[in-house]
Amino acid sequence: MKSKISLLLVLLFLTLFAMLILPSEYYTEDMVLQIPFISFLAKPKLYTNDYLQKYGATSTQLSFYYLLVAGLVKFLPLDLFNLLRILHGVYLFILFSVLYKFSHFIGLSHFAYILFIIFLISHLHVGGSGITLIESEFIPRGLGLIVLLYTAVLIFEKRFKTSFVLATLSFLIHGTTSIFGFLVGVVAFIINKYKKRMVWGVIVLIGGYGIGSLFLWLYVPRLDLDWLKILRLRNSYAFIDTWTFRSWINLLILLLPGAICLWLSKTPQRLKDLIQCSYIGGLIALSIQILFTSVKPIFPITILQLGRLWIIPVYISLVSLAYMIANLVKKNLTRIVVIITVGLLVICINKRSSVLAQTSHLSEWLEIQKWAQENTATNCVFLVPFFTKGFRVESQRAIVGEYKDGTLSFYSRDFASEWEKRRIDLSSWQQNNDAYIQKLHQKYLFHYIVDKKDNLRSFPIVFESKSYRVYSLIKC
């Protein structure tokens, strides 16, 4: 009983620590697209004139996650911000609980487990994939990862029927994550089946990979070149040949502890097996990505964003790092000092300038959104600076477009083409005169403009903040 209470307290402490030091991305990154879609599902009268809805860009990536959150918004007396704060805490607690069971299976000590979780809380990117070690918000891929990890735990416990149900659920929540789980699972099955006849295992693995790749090469047509051009422009992280040298170094450093641990004689066999399976799965995914996103780009391989699947090998590698440190540090007092030191290092990593820059000038941007929500009709459309983020979130109003919208180009060729047209039209509208804005107005039928104060316009001013003015063109 005491051990369960101690574990619960550790999990709660780690969850609170993560919530306090992980940078919030509620008004940045993927949330600026997901929150409006959740709001639309909860209140269908919102964003009716937004081109994201007209082109079905968000509905094409519909998952159980969106329906769950929208349903909770409808029935709970909480606004979306506070609901997602709570859900993020629940997500972290469940993730850390599942990872505890995972680490217990491997044979990690409590000290090693705590170190591993603190490593995960550091806001570090996984190569050039565009994702971090742990999600700063409650989003589909984070939820899908939890289900996938628990599926692995159930397989370890030989509860195969339940694991199959959870694997299906993982696919419904976030398909890409579950695909990598399937890939690693196939590799693990082959390695386990041919453990005593490794040569045959290698032949089966290479043969299956070769036949599958040959089929895709011969029978799946090349991705439309115009669509590919847009994807490479906006979503370069999905194309391995666009990763920077720094991104590759980042990934190799994160994977290094696992590679070292693989060759240590004292490493538990279960951990070695996990390293082998995840690294081989990662290399297979990498080769598929090179072949079918760079050499011959095809659908749907391009939209799978296979570079993000390195998250699993990186997790295993950080487990290995925690295991090695735990073997070196034996005294309890020294272990406490190590935990505090690593925790302080993670705080410094998460408070570095590049991370804090994400939320700079946020209060003023929110002030304008609040004004729009309280003083304009729900069917109004705003022209905002193209390279700003998240005007839809608190304003609950449609916009002509922003750069972040292009992320959704993966899910629809028609939307990608429309976003590219808007990118060309909107990228530099602030540097143009009022006549150009009038042309944009005739094309996109917006009602208000949000522009920097430096760009004085002849349109009626309806609101201004420290750095921005809102102009009215026509009534909604």
Image (tube, grey):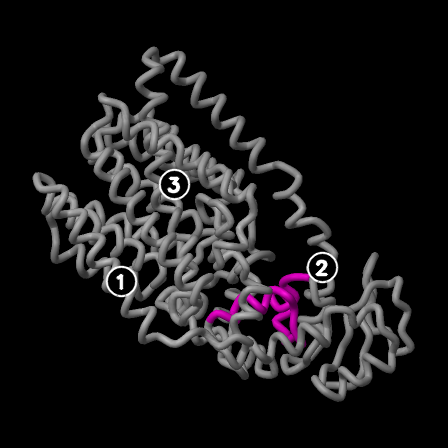
Q: Quadrant of the C terminus?
A: bottom right
Q: What span is colored magenta in the figure?
A: 388-410
Q: Which residue is mark 3?
A: 314
* Place of residue 307 in the rendered image (x, y in percent of width and height, measured from the top left): 43, 53
Q: Is residue 241 visible?
A: yes
Residue 169: assigned label: 1
Q: Report if residue 69 is visible in the image.
A: no
Kindly identify the amino acid type of the residue bearing the numbered disc 1.
Leu
Alpha carbon distance from label 1 to label 2? 38 Å
Residue matched to label 2: 365
Secondary structure type for disc 2: helix
Q: Is residue 476 left or right of residue 3?
A: right
Determine the residue located farthest toward the left in the rendered image: 196
Horizontal and vertical percent position of residue 456: 90, 69
Name the residue located 52 percent from the left edge and 65 percent from the top edge.
35
Instruction: Where is residue 213? Give x, y as percent.
Output: 30, 63
Among numbered discs 3 and 1, the one appearing first in the sequence: 1
Quadrant where the N terminus sits is: top left
Tell me the kind of residue under disc 2.
Trp
Decide: marks 1, 2 in contact (CB < 8 A)? no
In the displayed structure, 370 sits above or below 383; it is above
Mark 3 crowdedness (10 Å alpha carbons): few <14, some 14-19, many ≥20: many
Query: Residue 309: within the magenta?
Result: no
